[in-house]
Amino acid sequence: MKNTPMPTALPHARLTLTVGPVLYHWSRSSLLHFYADLADSPADTIVLGEAVCARRRELRLDDWLALGRELSAAGKQVVLATQTLIESEADLRLLERQAEQHEFAVEAGDASALQLLAGRVPLVLGPHLNIYSRAALQEHADLGADRWVAPVELSLDQLAAVNPAQDPVRTPAGLPMRTECWAFGRLPLAFSARCFTARHHRVPKDDCGYRCLADPDGLLLSSTEGRPFLNLNGTQTQSATVQNLLGDGARLRAAGVASLRLSPCARGFNQVLADFDEVMNGQASVAGRAEAWAALGVPGPFSNGYLHRLPGMVWQSA
């Protein structure tokens, strides 16, 4: 097995960087170009696969596996993402194939995937699983998971209470559970069997013409007052603001966080990734970095409210 568990982070150990799955509908050529760039990036772990919509099939499972082998050869840890909503027999067959492969760990997008995956592949607990207590995390660790991507609405003190740095939850093999925190990207809020992008364009979900290809960072929804409110991404609803924890490294380490998840955006992502590595692991100054992202096309505005027990869309500067 290529993907071996990694130890819990020490107070000044490297905060490993995980590039989450591309949540938007990008063309095949855009996806291949994006991952080719990541092969030479500071990313430690890359999560591959379609997690939002079963109709998005620019790359099939065999394509993702081949891409995973290339990234693994470049020194990256590769994880396969499962679809978050399992709606059909075809979705179940894909999940079964992910459970049957023995090359990469698999991230459970929802509790419905756990029964098929547990005990068959190295398991990662995705951010959409309802894990809000140490007891719940221990129950999932007993299934063989060794990494927990925390729900995005948890605060720093809640993260520390669920999986304390000094007394982490452990797997049956005695390995410490790693906490991964959503550090960059629009926050995933909800999924639905209804496609909101198709509804916006007044086309049927099953004959949508892949309208979401025109929105590589989703479709921004404003309130009646004209304020950005939500972001529509097919069957997924996201926050309008972009989570940005670039200035929160010391507090994340103190809470026991060992890994940071960066969710891809269509433009400027390579610079975001480089800046996170330099600030979090190279002791570089955070000053001016996020402000410079706008010129590269990185979406905004930023928020980090949930981390500080504030409304999620609030921005509290470091």
Image (cartoon, grey):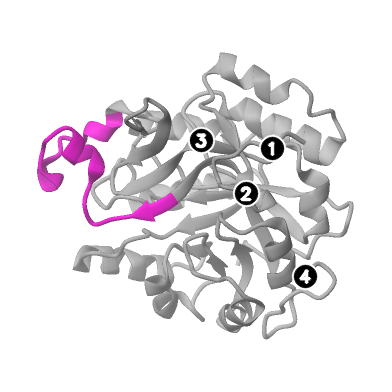
Q: Position of residue 22 (x, y in %)?
A: 45, 42
Q: Which residue is mark 1?
A: 316
Give the mark, 3 or 2, whose residue is nearer the N terminus: 3
Q: Residue at x 83, y 47 (%)?
A: 250
Q: Specify few, some or many for label 3: CA neighbours under 10 Å numbering under 14, 14-19, or 20 or more.
A: many
| Residue stretch in magenta | 189-213
Q: Are marks 2 and 1 in contact (CB under 8 Å)?
A: yes
Mark 3 to mark 1: distance in Å?
Answer: 13 Å
Amino acid at dot 2: Leu
Disc 1 marks which amino acid?
Gln
The Cα atoms of the two marked residues, 2 and 4, are separated by 22 Å
Q: 219 or 28: which is nearer to us? A: 219
Residues at marks 3 and 4, CA–CA distance in whole angstroms: 29 Å
- Determine whether the residue tagged by mark 1 lies in a helix, strand or loop: loop
The answer to whether residue 28 shows anywhere in this view is: yes
User: Quick check: can you spot residue 73?
Assistant: no
**Amino acid on which the number 3 mark rests in the picture:** Thr
